[in-house]
Amino acid sequence: MSRHRLNLTTRPMAEARSGARGRDTVEGRAPTAAGDHPLVPGDVTPPCTAADPELFWPATESEAAQAKAVCRGCPVVHSCLAVAQERREWGVWGGELLGRGRSTTDLPGNVRPPQHRGSASA
């Protein structure tokens, strides 16, 4: 499964935390792609949908800068970052390099965490 993201609109974090179900959300299972976070398909097309998914688990500082640049100007950048922090994600989310949901300077080495590995890379 690729890490490409869906067209997204946000729902309040309180709804996401409470487990409130929205149209086409993925609830009750481990996330396998960035499109699985509690943002629902809608009218917004974030720029990451057109980017190489591997870019968001950068192996070099240059790749990290490229991934962060993709996030600049994204209409859901703040929601994406909040969700990633809540879920303790790794890689570039919401324009920040994260390690277990916290800002970091440690590069993940372009190795996807287990919850983001698809059947082809598992």
Image: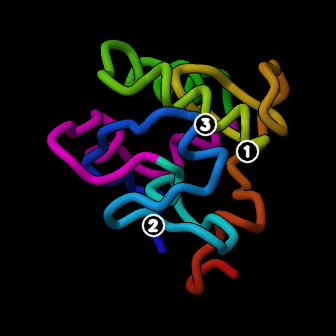
Mark number for residue 87?
1
* For marks 3 and 2 on the same chain, the one whose residue lies earlier in the sequence: 2
Give the labeled residue for mark 2.
2
The residue that disc 3 covers is 83
Q: CA distance from mark 3 to mark 2?
A: 19 Å
Q: Earlier in the sequence, mark 2 or mark 1?
A: 2
Residue type at tag 1: Arg
Q: Is residue 97 left or right of residue 35?
A: right
Asked if the magenta segment contains residue 47, the reply would be yes
Q: Nearer the viewer, residue 40 or 50?
A: 40
Q: Which residues are magenta?
A: 39-59
Residue 53, image x, y percentages = 46, 51
Q: Separation of disc 1 and disc 3 at Cα?
A: 6 Å
Q: Residues within 10 Å of mark 1 (few under 14, many from 20)?
A: few
Does 18 sit above or below residue 96?
A: below
The answer to whether the residue labelled 1 contacts the one labelled 3, judged by CB atoms less than 8 Å apart, is yes
Task: Nearest to the eye among marks 3 and 2: give it.
Answer: 3
